[in-house]
Image (cartoon, helix red, strand yellow):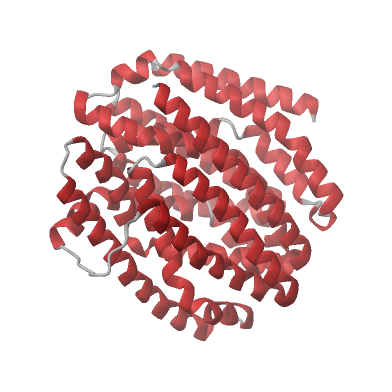
Amino acid sequence: MKKIIKDTVIFAGANTISFVISALGGFLVAKILEPEGYGGFSAYKLFISYLINLHMGIFQGLQREIPFYRAVQKEDKLKSLLNTAFSFTFLISLLSIIILLLSSITSSEFFRKSFFITLPLIPFYFLKEFYRFAMKGLEKFKELSFLNIFDSINLIVFVIFFSIYFKAEGAVLGFGISHFILFFFAYFFTRIIFFNFKIKFEDLKSLFTVGFPIFFIGVLNIFLFSIDRVFILGIYGRREFGIYAMAMNFLNLIFQVPIAVATIFLPFLTRKKAKEGSLSEFIIKRDYIIYIYLILVSLLVIIFYPMAFFVIKRFLHKYYTALPLLKFLLLFIPFPTLNYFFYSFLIAENKHFYIIPYHLILIPFTVIVNSIFIPKFELKGACLSYLISQFLFTLITIFLTYRFIKFKILRTLTFVVLISFLHFLIFELIF
């Protein structure tokens, strides 16, 4: 438990520092590019995030299998899995280049230029993700913490430099070059690289079997929680997309805490499941962690908002209309962050795939909600749609966790609702 707390503090702290650096640099990029250019750059990154999903769950499978095979001391199998995953990563990066070439035929001039200038750098987008997931599985959280901080500095330096001279297209180029530089540092920390590309079907099947449900859920999550942005880009264009992206970028700073907690917890829970067979006792005896976590998130939000207000008002006045959106999101955000915590238990129990049918219901529901609220309430309607989806998804995750891991759900939900309600009142009274 002490190791979990220590790793969480280090990793969450590094993630927060990394995200603050990225945010501050991102604000400068936003100022240089202005809303339309910043919206284009944000849309390019969104497209790349979709493209990365060609790995089909191999990365998630690797993250889960590494601690398992280390626990049972099968080093040869572990090396074989890493070789297969690395080789497969490079192969799908070549496929993504073909997809970008085909996409450029029907794209606008900005996106066509952006795709062409980053084609040689595409493999490094995928390799970055390979190393990140491998380091999580190997529990190299100190090294990953440093890498994340370096990545944020590296990214911002190159994006700002090229943005000054080439505007939005330059930001895209800087984004690609930063991934190329990061590859060498990731290799230095892991010493994982394979020049003899070898894909064993048995290993690929194993990684796919474990990782595909996690991946598929991740894809559904990305789509579910980006429907609002797709609607905004389609209805209002790049400028309004840039305003909304600014609010969401600030919100993502808060989400670094639950992401870090879940990332640290997963290898620990996987080992505990392998050794003890059940996680019920753990969550029953330590449910106080949930309440402490929620209180800390609430305090973080209350401290965070004045800082965000100052930054936008003082340095990013063209994005001032993002402030009401951010305030509205922060009123309700502590509760939805719990989905990361409970989802890590589902993955450890290998029951995460049971959430897929609920995604398939939530996605069309979210499309309908966005199609109603965004034309009527504009960007604030998008925020409302986003929160509704987050709330429903979190509730589903909690109840599914209870289905497979028995814990005191009524007591947990009572405290969770109470803390969330107090946060709403305090935040509304102060701001």
Q: Is residue 163 above or below residue 350?
A: below
Q: Which part of the image, by quadrant, shows the C terminus?
A: top right
Q: Is residue 193 above or below residue 78?
A: below
Q: Nearer the viewer, residue 78 or 115?
A: 78
**Image-quadrant location for residue 151:** bottom right
In the rendered image, the residue lying farthest to the left is 202
Q: Which part of the image, by quadrant, shows the N terminus?
A: top left
Q: Residue at x 26, y 31 (%)?
A: 271
Q: Residue at x 61, y 53 (%)?
A: 372
Q: Is residue 64 above or below residue 415?
A: below
Residue 41 visible in rendering:
yes
Residue 5 in picture, x, y percent from top left: 46, 25
Q: Residue at x 65, y 75 (%)?
A: 169
Horizontal side of 7 relative to 418 (left or right) equals left
Q: Nearer the viewer, residue 30 or 413?
A: 30
Q: Nearer the viewer, residue 124 or 306?
A: 124
**Image-quadrant location for residue 305:** top right
Q: Residue at x 70, y 39 (%)?
A: 328
Residue 418 in picture, x, y percent from top left: 58, 18
Residue 110 in picture, x, y percent from top left: 63, 79
Horizontal side of 408 relative to 250 (left or right) equals left
State how many labels appear.
0
Residue 219 visible in rendering:
no
Residue 128 in picture, x, y percent from top left: 43, 59
In the rendered image, the residue lying farthest to the bottom is 105
